[in-house]
Image (cartoon, rainbow, N blue to C red):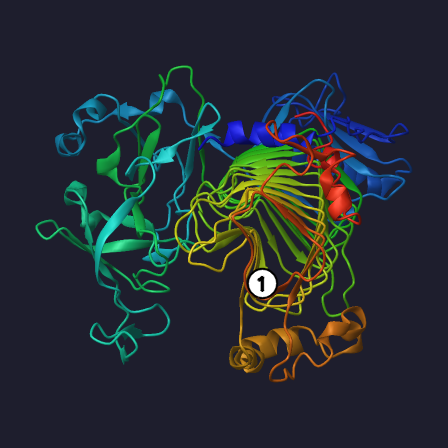
Amino acid sequence: MNGKKVFAATVMMAGMALQGLAMLRCETQPDLTVHVRPGGDDAGPGTQAHPLGTLAKARDMVRTARQQRALTTGAEIVLHGGRYVLNDTLMLSAEDGGTSAAPIRYRAARGEQPVLAGSTAIPASAFLPLADPERLARLEAPARERVVAVDLKALGFPAMPKPRDVFRMPMCVPELFCNGRRMTLACWPNEGFAHIAKILDMGTQRGTGSVSDSADPKKKRTQENRGGCFVYEGDRPARWRVEEGVWLHGFWCFDWYDDVIRIGAIDAEKKEIRLQAAHEYGVRQGNPSPRRWRAVNVFDELDAPGEYMVDLQAGRLYFYPPEPLAGSRITLAFRGEPLVRMRDLSHVIFEGLTFEETQGDALRVTGCSHVVVSRCVFRNHRMRAIVVEGGVKNRIASCDIHDTGVGGVILDGGDRKTLSPAGHVLEDTHIWRYSQHLQTYASALTLKGVGNVARHNLLHDAPHMAVAISGNDHLFEYNVVSNVVMASDDAGALYKGRNPSCRGNVIRYNLWSEIGSPRGHGTAAIYFDDGDGGDTVYGNLFYRCGDPGKGSFGTVFSHGGHGNVAENNVFIECKRALGSSPWNDKRWKQFIDAPLWQERLLREVDITSGTYTGRYPELIGFMDPQPGALRENIAIRNLFVACDGITKGNWNTNAVYVATAEDPGFVNYAKRDFRLKRNAAVWKRMPEFKPLPLEKMGLRRKR
């Protein structure tokens, strides 16, 4: 992917302001300052000359001081440069919090780089050459002299569970790092995926016990839980030892859902693989593109520098080092708990720290208020960087988050029954390569609950979506999103849907660039799915976003829903700007009456209550849809430039808009400076159109 090149052009196009975001700092001297340094002495006083050695001891010292006397101006724990290995989660609870006048601050010493790590070092001397002739014979010749092994049990690492027959990534094996870089589980193929040559049997669909009859796909028959069967290309699977356990990671039905299934049997003569267990949707052609799969954690596939394999039963790790082991830092992350966990506290600040190499999330913030995470780096986490659950007014600012396995940031807070907002904020944060393990639904950002905000962030480079929204009255503004949805289908960079009680969200003043890769079904920049409605898309710029696929998709796409508004946006070189696949009266009624919507619309919340109808008047009568009712999405004052198509479906574009195949008056179309000149023709044809604040989109800080 040439994401860096495209992203650089996108940033230049946006004209990001390089305003220095003011650093958070104490206005007054704190009552207590505790210094910590790797190799320090926890029996010491915690001064700069005699620092403590662990964060847990520093936390306890502040806790004791709070119990003994009031901290009128707060306390700070100063972390000096070096690597802090957290063998246990650093737990912070209510007694470790502060107040608005007396916050508790964990900060990097000026000019130093403290690193909080969840991995354990493995000495180079612990890796030994392979001596087992049978094992050596299974490797390709170049690897036989390079692959080494380490006995994890002998080093004291705990036993690891065997993976289930079916699961979603990541795999339950430790993460291996070499000099700060994540190593790759031995896989085939080494890059990308192999294709299924032919599906022989879809198997049963997990949880249903039913399967389509081969002669009549509409006819179902009850079956045992049975895995699918397919024909593979080439000869590689004949090498694998099924009895040792071989798992395949694949897109077995749809290109928006990946998971892992164990192989039950391989017939090398027929080139057939039978899966051990049923798949959620069956092994079938749910999307037009070829069904994709790859083998993971296979000993026989240790054939490239940087690959490793873990024999879970024997407790041994095999490694093909990318560089000499002598002098390298080899670390293993195996503990699934967060590095730091805060619960039920207020006014704690983390500033200038690096969190890295964890098997779980890096930071979890539960039931807290006024927590600030500023200028921190999060990298190489198996799960996510930051998860905020509940509480109010927590803020993440000016952070860098990259190379995570299952997403970036979750902001979840606010009461959906009362529509009370949480006010959590993510701003000026750069998130990229955030779905290294799970290929779908591992978003850079997830907004849940009510009234949370994401502004001035950069999100890019991922196979699937960048933003997931559920809940009400969230604000997504002044962000730049590019080069996502690059390996998935029937997907959008921002996805929201399947619950019409979630509405009132505003998506404004964002730049969307190079979204989607054609795979046949269709992709979008913004995707309102399964009856979703009541949201606003205002003042965005979309450049080369989405693909119509089978016919209904658009850059802004609505599936089944209505009441969404697209206003004052600019669409440039998009194959279709506005798309929809509306539902007829029968299908709409079926969804209204279905148990799922009855639960979501009347019991989880009550959209017939005054709380909801007062905030969203369009919900009056929603539960009693009338035949022939007008159900439309509204497009107002949009500019369409060099788009192959403007609209499809139930978009009402009766309001004024401009569609042109030529430059409508951009400052420099060729260089992607899409600001409109004062004398641009668009002002004459659409005088009420408002110029987009392109110079404000993206980070307000230097990267």
The amino acid at mark 1 is Gly
Secondary structure of the residue carrying numbered label 1: strand
State which quadrant residue 613 falls in: bottom right
In the picture shown, does residue 285 fall above or below 21? Answer: below
Q: Is residue 703 rendered to the left or right of residue 295?
A: right
In the picture shown, does residue 190 fall above or below 640? Answer: above
Residue at point 58% right, 69% down?
531
Residue to which mark 1 is pinned: 497
Q: Is residue 246 visible?
A: no
Camera-side residue: 136 or 7?
Answer: 7
Q: Residues within 10 Å of mark 1 (few under 14, many from 20)?
A: many
Q: Is residue 284 visible?
A: yes
Total marks in image: 1
Q: Position of residue 465 (x, y in %)?
A: 53, 48
The quarter of the rendered structure image containing the C terminus is top right
Residue at point 52% right, 39% down?
483
Q: Is residue 669 rendered to the left or right of residue 47?
A: left
The quarter of the rendered structure image containing the N terminus is top left
Q: Position of residue 367 (x, y in %)?
A: 72, 55
State which quadrant residue 145 falls in: top left
Q: Position of residue 635 (x, y in %)?
A: 67, 58
